[in-house]
Amino acid sequence: MPQTHRLAEQIIAELTAQNRTLTTVESCTGGLVFATMTDIAGSSAVMERGFITYSNQAKQDLVGVAEETLIAHGAVSEEVAAEMAMGGYRLSADGALAVALTGIAGPGGGSLAKPVGLVYIAVADKARCSVFKHHFSGSRAAIRSAAVASALTEISNFMA
């Protein structure tokens, strides 16, 4: 069993024990975190909902990212990741945990300031929001896969 599936099983068990749910807000991963979680039997007890917010407009419309934040910092930024996660949390049931990912999976679209492989992962609940900056290398598929694994790790650490 892949490491991501072991982590997903652990997260489902912990969420179940805490009587919590998980909401995902995904851009560069396009729903892969949600799909990884729902690959596990029993996930329906804890998976609240998932938002795929690939465009800037979707980030605004679906989870309330401020246009001003997008203009000031760009879609791939700590600030946008935090607003995505907090928006996902606000739109979820009580007791929810939300994870958000925004990044540049490549192979194009990067710059010196924001290179291909840059991914921000935010995890939020009622009490706090933590944002983590990652830089992954490899193909588009490798970057997206690494982002999913890191998101699961960040969720697990956030709940600890």
Image (cartoon, helix red, strand yellow):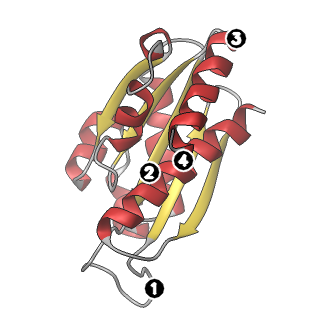
Measured from the top left, where is residue 147 in percent x and y? 47, 56
Mark 4: amino acid: Ala
Mark 1: amino acid: Ala
Residue at position x 34%, y 66% from top?
Answer: 71
Q: CA distance from mark 4 to mark 1?
A: 22 Å
Q: Quick one: label 4 or label 3, which is nearer the N terminus?
A: 3
Q: CA distance from mark 2 to mark 4?
A: 8 Å
Q: Which-is-in-front pick, marks 1 and 2?
A: 2
Pick the residue in front: 90 or 69.
90
From the viewer's perspective, is residue 64 above or below residue 47? below
From the viewer's perspective, is residue 116 above or below residue 20? below
Q: CA distance from mark 3 to mark 1?
A: 41 Å
Q: CA distance from mark 4 to mark 3?
A: 20 Å
The residue under label 2 is 101
Mark 2: amino acid: Leu
Residue at position x 46%, y 17% from top?
Answer: 43
Q: Which-is-in-front pick, marks 2 and 4?
A: 4
Residue 26, picture quadrant: top left
Measured from the top left, where is residue 18 in percent x and y? 70, 13
The residue under label 3 is 17
Q: Residues within 10 Å of mark 3 (few under 14, many from 20)?
A: few
Q: Horizontally, is 145 left or right of 106 in the view?
A: right
Element marked by disc 1: loop
CB atoms of marks 2 and 4 within 8 Å = yes
CB atoms of marks 1 and 2 within 8 Å = no
